[in-house]
Image: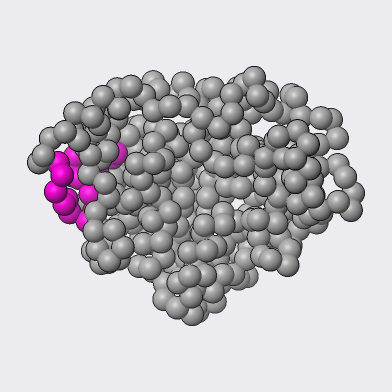
Amino acid sequence: MSQGVPGTPPPKLFLDTLARVSADPKNCGYVENVGEKVLRQAMVEEMKIAYGGDADVDLTAEDVAITAGCNLAFFASVMTVAEKGDEVILPVPWYFNHEMTLSSLGVTIVTLQTSPENAFQPSPEECKKLITPKTKAIVLVTPNNPTGAIYPPSLIASFAKLARAHNIALILDETYRDFLNSAHLPPHRLFSTAREADGLSADWSWRSTIIHLFSFSKSYCIPGHRVGMICASPSLIPQLNKSLDNIQICAPRPPQLALAECLSQLRPFVKDTARALEKRHTLFKEFLPPRWKVGAQGGYYAFVKHPFRDVDARTVCERLAKEIGVICLPAGFFGPADSTGMKDAERWVRFSVANVDDAKI
């Protein structure tokens, strides 16, 4: 229960389609850096459904770039908006790949602390205090990795307005978007043409601020095929193109073509997977020992406080692995080396409920 990987095999329809397009010699060449146009257009249609319907969602294929996984989407996005010595605001606990990317690029990480008292929801008011002339972006992950916290549309809109007011990017990683239940849909209204949505102004345009990231790995259970996505302003895409040309050339072509052909037919599979995962979250909470407390839960993850005072989560995780064969990760993996900065930080543990079945839960 340590790694965020799908526990369900890919749908047969995708595998069969992939086998067929992979066998076609004409699909073995390069494609443009931003990916297959047919997949970019197909994803626009999927996003229109996810974010509220065709008439209300302002998206085109020119807003989309396909990447070799979502980690590369984040890497390329940061390369595009920030240089060495610039600052990016990153909520803590953080997704450690984001921290490693920023560090490797020489970008200064400014931490925005979240807390269990607020269900690990980041505060726009506290974030505002961290913005300086060197700030280039704010990063949000929702549903969150590692905490599982689901950010409501109003909170996401508040961060979007804050970013726009300071002329910085809001990098919004929605890798786990398809695992939200109906109570949390749509995930937000930033792409909506309804200007009054969540207090957005009449002149709101998501393209001025938002860099949206998505992964096909989780929704379609294909992490090994490395397909991710960036949705950003067409004026930013050429700059992203420069980054992508230096670090990927193009994302793997056959899975792009296979996805483009069958995305609409895979909607039932995605919904069934989401329902199964929601059930697993319920089981996890039901069978968790009473003294263990869930601080947040959603997407693939549950962030849990263990009951043992003065015992570091690393020790607890080590004993869980050695004594009962349950592997999970301590909160210390998801924050600065000295501390995550929150109360009882040493007592929090991340569990992934996606790559085990109900019986193992």
Q: Position of residue 166 (x, y in %)?
A: 47, 69
Looking at the image, how many numbered discs can be counted on the residues? Answer: 0
State which quarter of the image contains the C terminus. top right
In the image, residue 272 above or below residue 320 = above
Q: Quadrant of residue 193?
A: top left
Left or right for 248, reference 308: left
Q: Please, which residue is most extreme toward the left here?
A: 26
In the image, residue 361 above or below residue 95 = above
What residue is rendered at 30% in x and 27% in y? 15
**Residue 205 in view in this figure:** no
What residue is rendered at 46% in x and 45% in y? 174
Q: Nearer the viewer, residue 175 or 139?
A: 175
Left or right for 307, reference 207: right
Please name the colour scheme applied to the rendered image: one colour
Residue 32 is a magenta residue: yes
Write the start and end of the magenta stretch as one range. Answer: 27-44
**Residue 343 in view in this figure:** yes
Q: Position of residue 191 (x, y in %)?
A: 37, 46
Q: Position of residue 234 (x, y in %)?
A: 25, 58
Q: Nearer the viewer, residue 257 or 225?
A: 225
Q: Position of residue 184 (x, y in %)?
A: 54, 33
Left or right for 298, reference 169: right
What residue is rendered at 67% in x and 40% in y? 327
Residue 108 is a magenta residue: no
